[in-house]
Amino acid sequence: MAARVLRPRAVLHRPTIAAFCRPYHSFDHPAPSQAFTNSEHALLSAAYEHVPDHGFSHQALTLGAKDAGYPDISTSILPDGAFSLIRYHLVTRRQALARTSQTLWGEESSGSKASVADKVERLAWERLLGNTAVIHRWQEALAVMAQPSYVPASLKELARLADDIWYLSGDTAVDPTWYTKRGSLATIYASSELFMTNDKSAGFADTREFLQSRLGAMLPPSRRTTSAGGPLDVSDRPGNSRSEAACDGGGGGPTADG
């Protein structure tokens, strides 16, 4: 009688909720790894002080390395060169929005909540103001970001900015509008940023008017509801609050790596 060959049975793993949750990328919900190493952060933060005078350039990096006590050759730890300095600006100014949100609405009472739309506008405006010190250098930065090698990273950071703004504004919807809202906001922010580089009005008043008009078209008055309820707040809809809680309240997309 022939011996029976036993074959290992395939083990089926049931996907858990965690498998479908993308970690939310913001100051309050940091990504698994830091955007910059300690040495990179030290060099870039020192170099950033020279951007107003020297732009997002190798010269600024060299001066920053000297200020931080590194030899000139240390700039070689930044393979993307000047773009690393641009990305440092993008990341740090985006992360600062979490602190801004806490300052503006951290003690918000239940009877005086600002609308989600108003929060979106305010945070987008605060982020634009983050460019004030380097606005005269920002067209140079945009030219670098438009280079094919840096377009993917630039767009990724813009997408993260739009995601952060919606999340910090209290929008926790997980539905098809997740993508359209973020895509629309990213487009509006990018156009407002470009507009700002040519704005000579006091306090960039024209830029804010431009931003408000574009956001007003995206979010008509009928949808300007408070974060306590209404079309933009779906936290009370069946199936959303529990899945959100399982992901620690994170954004990042309604599906895994979708």
Image (cartoon, grey):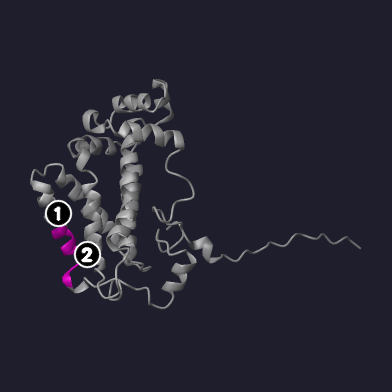
Earlier along the polypeptide chain: callout 2 or callout 1?
2
The residue that disc 2 covers is 118
The residue that disc 1 covers is 208
Horizontal and vertical percent position of residue 29: 43, 56
Q: Which mark is residue 121?
A: none
Label 1: element kind: helix
Label 2: element kind: helix
Q: Residue furthest top?
A: 72
- Disc 1 crowd rating (10 Å Cα; few below 14, some 14-19, many 20+) is many
Please tell me whether residue 214 belongs to the stretch shown in magenta: yes
Please tell me whether residue 87 is drawn above or below residue 224 in the rendered image.
above
| Horizontal arrangement in the rendering, residue 201 relative to residue 12 (left or right) | left
- Alpha carbon distance from label 2 to label 1: 13 Å
The magenta segment is: 212-221
Q: Amino acid at mark 1?
A: Arg
Quadrant placement of the N terminus: bottom right
Q: Residue furthest right?
A: 1
Please tell me whether residue 56 is drawn above or below residue 184 in the rendered image.
above
Tell me the residue at 25%/50% (across/down): 127
Tell me the residue at 35%/68% (across/down): 173
Horizontal and vertical percent position of residue 13: 62, 64
Please tell me whether residue 188 belongs to the stretch shown in magenta: no
| Horizontal arrangement in the rendering, residue 243 relative to residue 3 (left or right) | left
- Disc 2 crowd rating (10 Å Cα; few below 14, some 14-19, many 20+) is some
Q: Main secondary structure of the magenta part?
A: helix
Q: Amino acid at mark 2?
A: Asp
Tell me the residue at 28%/74% (across/down): 231
| Horizontal arrangement in the rendering, residue 203 relative to residue 51 (left or right) | left
Tell me the residue at 46%/38% (across/down): 37
Q: How many marks?
A: 2
- Asked whether the beta carbons under mark 2 and mark 1 sit within 8 Å of each other, the answer is no
